[in-house]
Amino acid sequence: MPRQETADERARRKARNRRIVVSFFAFIGLVAVLESPLARVRHIRVSGNTTVPMAQIVAASGVAYGESLWAVNRRRAAMAVVAKVPMVDRAAIDVSWPSGTVSIQVHERDVVAVYAARNGFYELMSNGYVYQKIASAAGLSYPILTGQEPVLSVHQMASAAVSSVCHQLAQVPASELNHVSEIQVNGDGTVTLYLDNDFEVLADVADLRGAMAAIGPAVDYFVAKGYRPGLIDLTGPPPYRYTPFSSLPGATAKASGASSQGALNGGTSSTAVSHP
């Protein structure tokens, strides 16, 4: 004769069965939610873009209409936008479940310089990306870059040296660039900056940001001491070396080009002076 269930055993069996039924319907409900149109991407919004088309940013993110909101990897999508769209330096993704909206917020890079190549003038972004070709550099507030690249192409990256200069220029306040008319990338890790007051400054590419901050005080010091325009070497720590143009190699050839760089005056011999 089979053993009769006790009241406690019967109660435990019923409770176990209820848990199984509840779990089953919870699973069915979860599947319904995941497959419901309400859990799909129904809207995609892009903000912060002024030059890059929305469609390009959406395509780069990999987010697609109708995709499950659960499948949207916000971090991966943001990294994909930055990697695939050179003009974007930051991106953030947000998902709104009630509305089924994926919001993509981007921050575009700024134009920091104009490169004067043999085949025209090109706007450069802060990462060295060649944004577009322009008719003329006249009247623009950006410094002119020259260097070892005679020809550039739109929507490509400039050389590593030019890109490094662009990256650092993005960190320089506009007030420190007001008197810089041209920056020549020399190809040896240095740049020559041509100033509006006819002085020239030699600086390391790696420390261009620091050199820009030192140009004003250094030039003011030499001018106050009566030095005429010449070359100020900021590639090392103070005291900075001043060399008159007449003492530089190729001074005769340099003097013949005075119309493009201003009056190139002679002065004292090469001198190392520290300024306060």
Image (cartoon, rainbow, N blue to C red):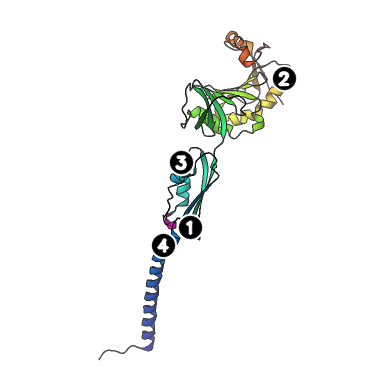
Q: Earlier in the sequence, mark 3 or mark 4?
A: 4
Q: Name the residue under label 2.
A: 223
Q: Nearer the viewer, mark 3 or mark 1?
A: 1
Question: For the residue carrying disc 2, how many other residues have a C-alpha within 10 Å: few (<14), some (14-19), or many (20+)?
Answer: few
Secondary structure of residue under mark 3: helix
Q: Which of marks 2 and 3 is nearer the N terminus?
A: 3
236 over 103 or under it: above or below: above
Write down the quadrant of residue 206 in the picture: top right
Mark-to-mark CA distance, 1 and 2: 65 Å
Circles 2 and 4 in contact, beta carbons < 8 Å: no
At label 4, the amino acid type is: Leu
As drawn, the label of residue 34 is 4
Residue 154 belongs to the span the image colors magenta: no
* Image coords of residue 230 (percent x, y): 65, 16
Question: For the residue carrying disc 4, how many other residues have a C-alpha within 10 Å: few (<14), some (14-19), or many (20+)?
Answer: some
At label 3, the amino acid type is: Ala
45 over 260 or under it: above or below: below
Question: At 47% across and 50% down in the image, what residue appears?
Answer: 75
* Residue range (magenta): 67-71
At label 2, the amino acid type is: Val
Q: Name the residue under label 1.
A: 100
Q: Mark 3 points at which residue?
A: 83
Question: At 36% across and 82% down in the image, what residue appears?
Answer: 13
Between 17 and 49, which is closer to the camera in this rendering? 49
Question: For the residue carrying disc 1, how many other residues have a C-alpha within 10 Å: few (<14), some (14-19), or many (20+)?
Answer: many
Q: Nearer the viewer, mark 1 or mark 2?
A: 1
Secondary structure of residue under mark 4: helix
As drawn, the label of residue 53 is none
183 over 66 or under it: above or below: above
Mark-to-mark CA distance, 3 and 1: 26 Å
Q: Which of marks 4 and 1 is nearer the N terminus?
A: 4
Circles 4 and 1 in contact, beta carbons < 8 Å: no
